[in-house]
Image (spheres, rainbow, N blue to C red):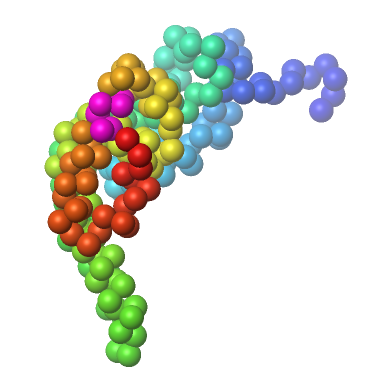
Amino acid sequence: MPPDEPQPPADDAATIEASWSDPERFAALFDRHAALMHRYIARRAGPAIADDLVAETFLAAFRRRRRYDLSCRDARPWLYGIATNLIGQHRRDESRRLRISGLILPDRDPPGHADQVAANVTASGTKAVLARVLAGLPGAERDVLLLVAWEQLSYDETAAALQIPVGTVRSRLSRARARLREELASSDASATFKEILGNE
């Protein structure tokens, strides 16, 4: 790159700030985080609607870019917050999809693979229990649980994404984990979801 060419922004905040005067720079934020947002949205709202919601997420982000807090160098919590709000508009669809996904059984294995068949039955049963519990959680608790468990956001990042205090993140996560524990304790699935339940 010639020395007189502007250097690319070093982080998300710099990218967003640069887009204030040069809107095309915002495309770098899309390139950096679109796949991550797509994975999150597809897991929650289903692949059929994921492309549309990803586009809506980045369109909303672009429109709000001048209000972005530039002290936050990583824009992922901001983007997760926008995506979660959009998913919230499809909350009823999400609950139905989670319930249905819990009923889907894996394909049958060929005869003679007894161990694999047993493992598939167990996995199917635990998936059904988890899907039912997730579908039954209040939306606010589900949002916190999935941002922490699926997206590996810290409590601070989750609070920033949802624009709630960290204490609220902790209390919602605690309630969601308690519900999961209660439901999973009555099944053989509790050990399977140790990562989700984590430590209080």
User: Residue drawn 33% across and 80% down?
Assistant: 115
Residue sitting farthest toward the bottom: 112
Q: Position of residue 42 (x, y in %)?
A: 35, 45
Q: Residue at x 18, y 41 (%)?
A: 179
Specify start and end residues of the magenta stretch as a single range: 169-174
Residue 147: which quarter of the image? top left
| Residue 36, position as x, y percentages in the image | 47, 40
Query: Is residue 98 a member of the stretch shown in magenta?
Result: no
Residue 87, visible in the rendered structure: no
Q: Residue 165 appears at what percent x and percent y? A: 32, 16
Left or right: 174 with respect to 151? left
Considering every residue shown, the one lying at the far front of the view is: 200
Horizontal side of 101 relative to 193 (left or right) equals left
Quadrant in which residue 92 is drawn = top left
- Please give left or right for residue 4 compared with residue 41 in the image: right
Along the viewing direction, whichever of 121 and 62 lies nearer the viewer: 121
The residue sitting at 59% across, 20% down in the picture is 15
- Main secondary structure of the magenta stretch: helix
Relative to the observer, which residue lies in front, 112 or 1?
Answer: 112
Residue 170 appears in view = yes
**Vertical arrangement, residue 108 with respect to residue 38, above or below:** below
Which x, y percent locates residue 51? 38, 41
